[in-house]
Amino acid sequence: MNSGTGGGGGGAGAAEPSRSGSPGEDGFAPSALGTREHWDAVYERELQTFQEYGDTGEIWFGEESMDRLIRWMQNRKIPLDASVLDIGTGNGVFLVELVEDFLNLSTKLSGFHICIDKGTFDAISLNPDNAIEKRKQYVKSLSGVLNVKGFFLITSCNWTKEELLDEFREGFELFEELPTPKFSFGGRSGNSVTALVFQKT
């Protein structure tokens, strides 16, 4: 199993769905949450807290989000030697769960069977410096590291199912939508997050 680096993944100052303020041409208001500097500072604080108190920090989207992804992998009988990329990685709690509960450790660095994103695409979407181009680079990079017929599991609090289908329309097809918590407000109902499984074509 391999881990990614960079933003996304957990930490104080969790990204909130935000299309208010002064949105860019893609509808998102630029935010510090979309910068590497923000996430470097978050993880530096979390590392210090871990060293001082043993607290592993926040789990991005909560424990249910980790359980949902692991259940899907178990139900699909993903091989124990599958090569997995956790995009963003955050504080690494999800990687620890994968190793303890599901996968064997692998040192393979390319040709991933599964790529997982819990919030990194959200953070990239808030980047104040040309977020649209950075999202295109993300999709291109994802396509480059994921095997053909490999799975991409994404959990997002900023994007709807339809929007994600549009963002990943080139080179990916929807394989499955995972159930997520629902809420009701003002007579309307929806999901607090979107969780989709794509397959690379």
Image (cartoon, rainbow, N blue to C red):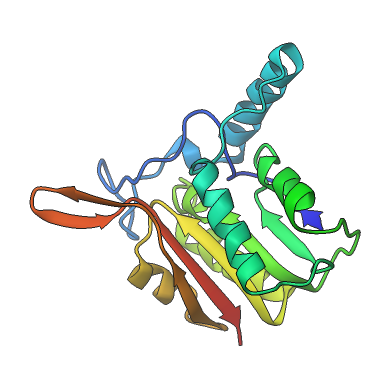
Q: Is residue 172 above or below residue 10?
A: below
Q: Going by the image, does 96 lie left or right of 108?
A: left
Q: Which residue reaches farthest left?
A: 187
Q: Quadrant of the C terminus?
A: bottom right
Q: Residue furthest top?
A: 52
Q: How many marks?
A: 0
**Residue 22 screen position, x and y as percent:** 27, 44
Please tell me in which quadrant of the rendered image residue 42 appears: top right
Considering every residue shown, the one lying at the far right of the view is 107
Residue 197 seen in the figure:
yes
Identified at 59% across, 61% down, the residue is: 71
Q: Is residue 36 left or right of residue 92?
A: left
At a point 79% along the width and 59% down the height, the residue shown is 103
Quadrant where the N terminus lies? bottom right
Q: Position of residue 192 (x, y in %)?
A: 33, 50
- Pinpoint residue 126: horizontal percent, then vertical percent: 44, 48
Residue 118 appears in the picture as rendered: no
* Residue 186, above or below 176: above
Residue at the spot 65% in from the left edge and 24% down from the top edge: 46
Q: Is residue 138 above or below residue 101?
A: below
User: At x 65% / y 49%, what residue is drawn?
Assistant: 88
Q: Is residue 172 left or right of residue 101?
A: left
- Front residue (pair 22, 112): 112
Q: Is residue 42 left or right of residue 96?
A: left
Q: Position of residue 56 (x, y in %)?
A: 67, 28
Q: Quadrant of residue 115?
A: bottom right
Closest to the observer, 197 or 18? 197
Res 172 → quadrant: bottom right
- Please determine whether, in this image, residue 54 is positioned above or below residue 117: above
